[in-house]
Amino acid sequence: WCAAAEGVFTTDIVLSHLKVYNVGELVNHKRLILPQLSVAGVKRKELKEHGWEGIYGPVYFTDLKEFLNNGLTKNKDMQALEYGYWERFKMGLSHAVFCTLVCIIPIFLFASDWWIQGIGLVWYFAFSMQLIEHFIPFERLLYKGLALSLPILVLTLTSIK
């Protein structure tokens, strides 16, 4: 979904890869099974204009075998996106590790007294955005981010002497 929405997985890119790798010459059909969440970036109508039939498959790759066995038909479970706490935790962990690696070097070089607090701050935001943000009653992500920033702002202002 993120790749499709951000313009990284689009109809043009799919068509480009089909052409570069001569997929049309390697197969005896013109059907593509696309990830369900590619809807934001890959348009079936445009694929059809280039001679390809796009079929949106299941959300998860693990359901692909069942999808194929069912004659390219999805059931409700195959269309459901699970984004519970475990998925949110994994996303938060990946963001926290990446941000720690990116942020720790400048923090350590320029503010060596603050590197532990800096790591704590990075991990707070990485996990709070993933685990808590859906409980915050605002719809816009900007307001949710501001709401999550308030505790840090209060702690910072109260610690200034």
Image (spheres, rainbow, N blue to C red):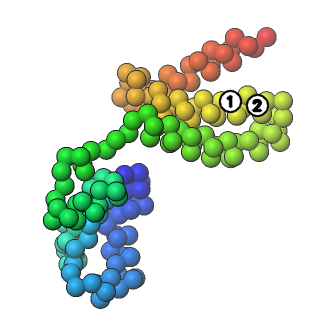
- The kind of residue on which mark 2 rests is Ile
Residue at image location 56% in from the left, 35% down from the top: 126
Q: Position of residue 119 (x, y in %)?
A: 70, 34
Q: Position of residue 86 (x, y in %)?
A: 45, 37
> How many C-alpha atoms fall within 10 Å of the one at disc 1: few (<14), some, or many (≥20)?
some
Labelled pair 2, 1 in contact (Cβ < 8 Å): yes
> How many C-alpha atoms fall within 10 Å of the one at disc 2: few (<14), some, or many (≥20)?
few
Residue 46 relative to residue 8: left or right: left
Rendered view: 106 above or below 44: above
Estimate the spatial distance between the alpha carbons at disc 2 and disc 1, rounded to whole Å.
6 Å
Q: Position of residue 115 (x, y in %)?
A: 77, 33
Whether residue 46 can be seen here: no
Q: Nearer the viewer, residue 73 or 161?
A: 73
Q: Position of residue 37 (x, y in %)?
A: 31, 53
Rendered view: 150 above or below 119: above
Q: Which secondary structure lies at badge 1? A: helix
Q: Which secondary structure lies at badge 2? A: helix
Residue 68 relative to residue 111: left or right: left
Residue 21 relative to residue 42: left or right: right
Residue 52's tag is none
Question: Would you identify the image quadrant in which residue 125 lies?
Answer: top right
Rendered view: 39 above or below 143: below
Counting the numbered discs, the total is 2
Residue at image location 66% in from the left, 16% down from the top: 155
Residue 45 relative to residue 108: left or right: left
- The kind of residue on which mark 1 rests is Gly
Q: Which of 95 and 68 is in front in this view?
A: 68
Residue assigned mark 2: 116
Residue 120's tag is 1
Residue at image location 56% in from the left, 19% down from the top: 150
Whether residue 157 can be seen here: yes
Residue at image location 68% in from the left, 47% down from the top: 102
